[in-house]
Amino acid sequence: MICCLGLAASFTACTNVQANQSTEFWVRGNCEMCKSKIEQTLEDSDGVAEAEYDLASNMVTIGFDSTLTSEKDLHKVVANVGYETKQAAADMGAYQLLPRCCLKKEDQ
């Protein structure tokens, strides 16, 4: 029981990331599913405290711990699940698995 409590406390400590830096960058997304996937993927990444994607501007704002990740890494995280940024091309395998509404108009 004590071991389990220690493990739970350790997990909680790992999820409480303190942001010491923020960034904002463009991500191609089309719909609420894109918004949800982009935000959740970033928030599940090491070092990210929060992520908010704005569909109207296609901009994501991220609070992160710069000792655990970098802006370049954050671009890669988004690209690895199929969304392009201005600094990272979308992984084509992941892109092709996105729902049809999440694809570029020319690919729908």
Image (cartoon, grey):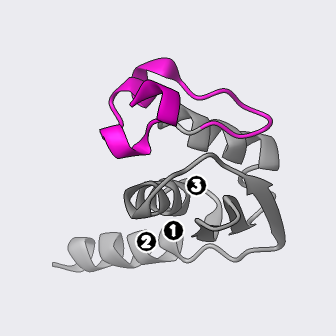
- Depth order, front residue of 107/43: 107
Quadrant location of the N terminus in the rendered image: bottom left
Q: Quadrant of residue 23?
A: bottom right
Which residue position holds label 2? Answer: 10
Which residue position holds label 3? Answer: 46
Give whichever of discs 2 and 3 has the lower sequence position.
2
What residue is shown at x 71% (from left), y 54% (from top)?
68
Q: Is residue 102 magenta?
A: yes
Where's residue 6, x and y in %?
A: 34, 75
What residue is shown at x 51% (from left), y 55% (from top)?
38
Would you say the residues marked 1 and 3 are in contact, meaning their CB atoms lie under 8 Å apart?
no
Neighbour tally class for label 2: few under 14, some 14-19, many 20 plus, Cα within 10 Å: few
Where's residue 84, x and y in %?
A: 63, 36
Could you tell me if residue 41 is visible in this image? yes
Residue 14, labelled with which disc? 1
Could you tell me if residue 104 is visible in this image? no
Q: Quadrant of residue 8?
A: bottom left
Q: Nearer the viewer, mark 1 or mark 2?
A: 1
- The magenta-colored residue range is 84-108
Q: Nearer the viewer, mark 2 or mark 3?
A: 3
Where's residue 62, x and y in %?
A: 70, 66
Q: Amino acid at mark 2?
A: Ser
